[in-house]
Image (spheres, coloured by chain):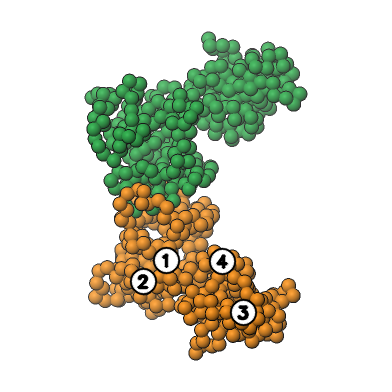
Chain colours: A orange, B green
Amino acid sequence: MGAALGLGERGRGRTAPNPNVGCVLVRDGRVVGRGWTQPGGRPHAEAMALRQAGEKSRGATCYTTLEPCAHRSHRGPTCSDLLVEAGVARVVAATGDPDPRTDGDGFERLRTAGITVETGVREAEARRSMAGFLTRRTHGRPHVTLKLATSLDGRIALPSGESRWITGPEARAHAHAERARHEAILVGRGTWDADRPRLDVRLTGVEDRSPRRVVLSSRPTTRHPSESWGRVENTGDVHSQDDPSFRWDDETSTWEVIPSPHAIADLAAVDHLLVEGGAQAAAAFLRAGLVDRLLLYRAPILLGSGLPATGDIGLADLASAHGRWRLHDARQLGTDRLEVYERA
Amino acid sequence: MGAALGLGERGRGRTAPNPNVGCVLVRDGRVVGRGWTQPGGRPHAEAMALRQAGEKSRGATCYTTLEPCAHRSHRGPTCSDLLVEAGVARVVAATGDPDPRTDGDGFERLRTAGITVETGVREAEARRSMAGFLTRRTHGRPHVTLKLATSLDGRIALPSGESRWITGPEARAHAHAERARHEAILVGRGTWDADRPRLDVRLTGVEDRSPRRVVLSSRPTTRHPSESWGRVENTGDVHSQDDPSFRWDDETSTWEVIPSPHAIADLAAVDHLLVEGGAQAAAAFLRAGLVDRLLLYRAPILLGSGLPATGDIGLADLASAHGRWRLHDARQLGTDRLEVYERA
């Protein structure tokens, strides 16, 4: 199942509206097939693994991170049917598929065909891995990660706006890898106005995984933000044009604009949304209760005065601030520390 | 030496102007005497250990965290003389005593008498343990620890000033234990005006170790702060009088006032100073380059808007913020995290 979970991770941020499933077929102690949901959502992980295994899938055990689908689609046969046809002997799943068109029917189809079915194996990890799909199914919106990169005293920039760099290269590389795991990245209008960030993935080998870009802007926009990009070219501010972070590409860039955090439900084919800044956008998402996961990169520096990480998040008192976040993971990235919190 | 270092820690914050030394005498593989500098600075650690060992010190090895003193005082004989007289065979020291009245003379006295001397054993730990004494010797001022208790986004209170509680009971108990390791605690005038903190040590068994209390106030004070304590009684603000943190005692309390961070050199018999708040006092000490150690308690909560941890610390640019702090220790205290940084 660990291997299946790892394969499932490959699809994270690229399979919406389908879940990023991973699948491993094992026969006689050997892996005979591996699959993961492909970009765009097809082929499904099980279909890919079965194709790879061919005749070797007969009598094999299928480890899959999600209940095999049972709903027919014009895009292909169901995975539960495929598993039956292939003669798989046993299916071990991490968790059930809440999609009402499957929701137990996948397991039922398998059992009816005489296949042994186990479920609930490493379920928490699978649910975390497919949080985007599950949040979409449960709440009808993307799973939202808020990224903050701060000093020890919670600043994201000097009073001048200078924020390059607070964190070191290891933390920034990690943040780029996180981008590749989201279908879309959002910044607030203030950050957009000030920085025109590229928000792409600048890591060797995954440059093609740069997500869609979204601006949160409550002000009516009479024209598409991309129409005013030319303004940036001659600002001469602290963000030098020599800094590749602030180049942009008129030809290929597209920005989507949403008026409020609640409008993220309108973002089609986005199951994972990364909110990257700045303080007002972060506060708006926190105030709306729409942050599921917090990525906190922290550098061992003090800035004193400067721009705060967030704005008013609508707390009535201190007691109500507690118990909302649970530390899930922490690691050192060079001299910086990353902490990952999840909604408690 | 580990045992000697542990004994030396018992005196931290209570031995100024003397160093908090620890000493263990070992003969034939058995501990025959243990000593640590007593409150007020006398007896010295070696004298205490030798007295405990009596005749068993003959031929013993003396493990001491600091070079035995060689300067005569009206308060007693030198430790190097005592060790010679006791017939100790070998002295293992962690580090030398920079006091110009000893500074190598202690080791010399021992060697002249035929005692084997080794030094530099666990020196870094010893220097950290006696940082107060060493900072006083080197810079003519106390060793300064700045304590910050913040949310994940670097806030120390809500906009209303409400700050009880950001951290949990484990972190607060740890902070009280830290108080007992300092001769004095300082708060800014703003914190003093708002809170009249007791700043005492509310831990069973060490209540008697509550340090001296200092206010940083650049405004001329026409009367001693203690004269205006009565004002607090009826404020009815968020700090309830039922909260023991804000009771005070007219009879026994004394506050010292200094006009600027640089005036800490005027605090006699204070080798360890703990700066506890608020943002302006923290910023003043950081701006003055007078913070040697940073105690950062961090709760897994977000506050959004609110009072920042520090004010302007005088940074010209981001580059100059880097490389100033080195993480020395980190631990989990309940749901909170403590990080200890040292001047890099």
Q: Tag on residue A264?
A: 2
Residue indicated by mark 3: A111
Q: Do labels 1 and 3 share a chain?
A: yes
Q: Mark 1 lies on which chain?
A: A
Disc 2 is placed on an element classified as helix
* Spatial separation of the CA atoms under disc 1 and disc 4: 21 Å
* Spatial separation of the CA atoms under disc 1 and disc 3: 36 Å
Q: Are marks 1 and 4 on the same chain?
A: yes
Q: Mark 4 lies on which chain?
A: A
Residue indicated by mark 4: A123
* Spatial separation of the CA atoms under disc 3 and disc 2: 39 Å
Q: Which of marks 1 and 2 is nearer the N terminus?
A: 1
Asked if the residues shown at circle 1 and circle 2 are in contact, with their CB atoms under 8 angstroms apart, the answer is yes
Name the amino acid, label 4. Answer: Glu
Q: Which residue lies furthest to the right in this view?
A: B28
Q: How crowded is mark 3: few (under 14 residues within 10 Å), some or many (20 or more)?
A: some
